[in-house]
């Protein structure tokens, strides 16, 4: 049944309606999710839309906004005797300010790529004499997993280095800064956790329509149609177009777990800057599991991108990947310069993979 | 299903997933769930999916009428 969400005829039907409404007007819509960019680029959705409708990517790639100095600090930790760092695969090759986890690994650092935080727990239980540090990054979709395990209680020889970030404060930040867009496609997976409510205050304050979309081509085109239609009707509602997976109230248990484990903090987004109340760190009562405290790590916020890299502007939707002078020249997925070219959720990597003419 | 774990099938491959974040949502054997980094985060509502598809099929058919 779900394959029908990829049905070409249905998608084209929606695209025709978008074209009908957008005649004589122009629209710019932002999404904030690497998986949305994947669908849009992979399915060629930009080519189905009239020229007047532009879709830009915002800061929807978690590893891209993880500060370089945090990557450096965790890479350094992996070099310590008896310490193993666990992380998700797409963080491995992301360049920090001076090194990457992959580079640390090649120099003897102990880094294990895991699929689930439960893998890290299993490793820690099997090797009691060693220390395990999970580099826990990601948005509201990934934070609840770490939260639920922290609340249950981690093995004594395990701690977490958290760099979790929240999407609505980043949308707020961009809107407050006057980003020139007509509406947001809200991230489907994040929304399964947080539901509809966090977007409502933003839609109301900035008078921008926001539509929660799933990840199939039909989902994304339906989201675009809804925004275009709302813009034409001068409404600014939050609409849940991904009702098969997103309850309006979100996943209340997951949210409760995050509340129990984490406190909201200001957080530094690489390439963007400090965003108030946009991050989560372990609560005082779980400080025993905080790797930064356990290993005395000191990390000052500092914003650096590799020289010549436009990733910061790409993350804000100011610059399209193809407009970066390094794109496809000095910077490719095989030899990435900046974080946006590394991750499978990075806008540059996705555009390079699917949209570059094949030689 | 056992405790807060369940066997899931993703693209024909069976593996174990945590349902610790869906406790209280009444997940049952045979349900579709959305899995993220080894954890089920949402139960998929097949009725909603069918309803959306039916709506768009109607629109498509209507367009084809002369």
Image: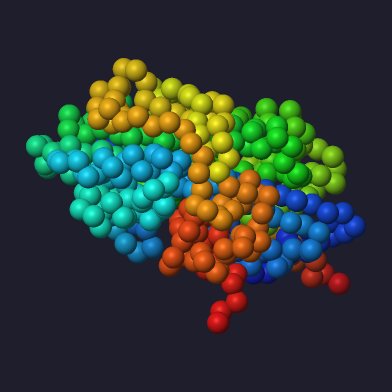
Residue A187: give x, y in percent of width and height. Answer: 57, 45
Residue A232: give x, y in percent of width and height. Answer: 85, 46
Is residue A23 in view?
yes
Residue placed most toward the observer, A327 or A156: A327
The residue that appears at 48% across and 24% down in the rendered structure is A265
Work out whether A225 lies above or below A136.
below
Residue A88: give x, y in percent of width and height. Answer: 35, 49
Work out whether B13 lies above or below A223.
below
Residue placed most toward the observer, A166 or B37: A166
Residue placed most toward the observer, A18 or A180: A180
Residue A16: give x, y in percent of width and height. Answer: 78, 64
Work out whether A157 lies above or below B58.
above
The residue that appears at 46% across and 61% down in the rendered structure is A336
**Residue A343 shown left or right of residue A60 in the figure:** left
The residue that appears at 66% across and 37% down in the rendered structure is A174
**Image quarter of the C terminus of chain A:** bottom right
The residue that appears at 24% across and 44% down in the rendered structure is A78
- The furthest residue to the bottom: A359
């Amino acid at each position: 049944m779900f394959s029908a969400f990829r049905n070409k005829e249905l998608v084209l039907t929606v695209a025709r309606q978008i074209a009908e409404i957008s005649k004589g007007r122009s629209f710019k819509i932002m999404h904030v999710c690497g998986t949305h960019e994947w669908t849009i680029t992979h399915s060629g959705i930009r080519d189905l839309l009239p020229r007047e409708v532009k879709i830009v990517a915002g800061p929807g790639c978690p590893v891209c906004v993880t500060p370089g100095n945090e990557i450096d600090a965790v890479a350094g930790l992996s070099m310590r005797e008896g310490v193993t760092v666990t992380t998700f695969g797409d963080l491995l090759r992301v360049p920090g300010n001076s090194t990457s986890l992959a580079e640390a690994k090649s120099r003897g650092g102990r880094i294990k790529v895991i699929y689930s935080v439960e893998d890290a727990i299993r490793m820690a239980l099997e090797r009691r004499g060693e220390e395990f540090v999970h580099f826990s990054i990601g948005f509201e979709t990934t934070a609840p997993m770490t939260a639920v395990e922290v609340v249950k209680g981690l093995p004594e020889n395990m701690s977490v280095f958290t760099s979790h970030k929240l999407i609505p404060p980043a949308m707020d930040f961009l809107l407050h800064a006057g980003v020139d867009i007509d509406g947001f496609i809200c991230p489907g997976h994040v929304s399964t956790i947080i539901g509809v409510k966090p977007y409502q205050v933003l839609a109301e304050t900035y008078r921008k329509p926001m539509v929660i979309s799933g990840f199939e081509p039909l989902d994304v085109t339906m989201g675009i149609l809804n925004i275009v239609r709302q813009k034409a009707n001068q409404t600014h509602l939050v609409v849940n177009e991904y009702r098969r997976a997103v309850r309006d109230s979100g996943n209340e248990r997951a949210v409760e777990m995050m509340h129990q484990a984490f406190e909201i903090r200001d957080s530094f987004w690489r390439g963007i800057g400090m965003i108030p109340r946009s991050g989560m760190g372990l609560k005082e009562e779980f400080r025993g599991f905080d790797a930064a405290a356990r290993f005395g790590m000191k990390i000052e916020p500092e914003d650096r991108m590799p020289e010549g890299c436009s990733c910061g502007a790409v993350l804000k939707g100011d610059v399209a990947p193809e407009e970066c002078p390094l794109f496809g020249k000095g910077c490719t997925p095989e030899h990435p310069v900046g974080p946006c070219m590394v991750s499978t959720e990075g806008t540059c990597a996705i555009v390079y993979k699917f949209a570059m003419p094949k030689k | 299903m056992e405790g807060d774990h369940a066997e899931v099938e993703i693209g024909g491959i069976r593996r174990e997933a945590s349902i610790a974040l869906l406790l209280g949502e009444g997940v049952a054997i045979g349900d579709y769930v959305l899995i993220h980094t080894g954890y089920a985060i949402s139960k998929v509502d097949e009725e909603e999916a069918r309803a959306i598809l039916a709506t768009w099929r109607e629109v498509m058919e209507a367009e084809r009428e002369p």
